[in-house]
Image (spheres, grey):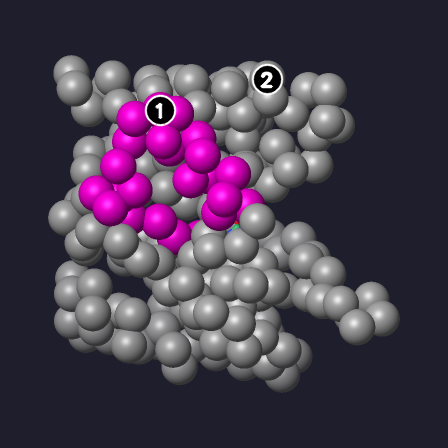
Amino acid sequence: MRNGYSSAVGAEEFLPVDRHQLASLRRASAGCRGCGLFEKATQTVFGAGDPDARVMLVGEQPGDREDRDGAPFVGPAGRILDDALVTAGLDKGSLYVTNAVKHFKWEASGQRRLHKKPSHTEVVACRPWLLAEIEAVGPDVVVCMGATAARSLLGPEVRVTRQRGQILPGPGGTPAMMTVHPSAILRADPGSRQAELERFAEDLRRVARYLAG
Ligand code: URA
Ligand code: SF4
């Protein structure tokens, strides 16, 4: 542990021997100390959904609600996602949903806990969990929602603005698609929110068409 930071280590050493079993991964992730983010967060928020899903959705990191509930996308961003999935005709029950980083990073603002973007080091530290989830689930396509997920899985050069909606070769050859993060739709000004939501749903529809072959 250089500099006394556990972030120099990363999640790798916390992965279970039985890393192809989602249940073992989830259990082991609860004890991860691969970077400093576990200290201020309530719990590890591991992925959830169908262990045989053909589509894996990847966000950035849990938010305030997810940190308390222990499940991904159960707060405001999750409602946007749910809306878009319904519009796109994708059944949430048949998906697997997770994040690039498994602990909530925040700073206090009065009584509130404000989301802070994870650093590159934290994203890299947490990536072994994400890669192990992809291996264990074996989806046909991974959807990177936002730049953090996209950079974690497709490299630092990718730009959502340029490659949005394209199906690219992802980790281990698994096809991956990049789209916006649902929080970007929450932040859009009211005049463009509906159009942004429609465009997000169109990206998800493209995934549905891809699966249909
Ligand atoms: N934003 C994310 O990226 N993931 C969540 O689980 C919730 C909000
Ligand atoms: Fe481990 Fe990821 Fe949490 Fe860091 S954010 S402690 S690497 S699970």
Please, is residue 172 above or below residue 133 in the view?
above
Quadrant in the picture for residue 83: top left
Quadrant position of the C terminus in the picture: top left
Quadrant position of the N terminus in the picture: bottom right
Say which residue appears at 70% left-offset and 36% top-offset.
187
Is residue 9 or residue 161 the one in the foreground?
161
Say which residue appears at 48% left-offset and 47% top-offset.
78
Which disc number belongs to residue 88? 1
- Is 86 a magenta residue? yes
Residue 72, image x, y percentages: 43, 57
Identify residue for label 2.
195
* Amino acid type at image mark 2: Ala
Say which residue appears at 46% left-offset and 52% top-offset.
73
User: Is 107 left or right of 156, judged from the image as shown?
Assistant: right
Badge 2 marks a residue whose secondary structure is: helix
Question: In the rendered structure, which segment of residues is drawn in magenta?
Answer: 77-99
- Is 135 a magenta residue? no
Quadrant in the picture for residue 170: top left
Badge 1 marks a residue whose secondary structure is: helix
Residue 40, image x, y percentages: 63, 78
Report the predominant secondary structure element of the magenta stretch.
helix
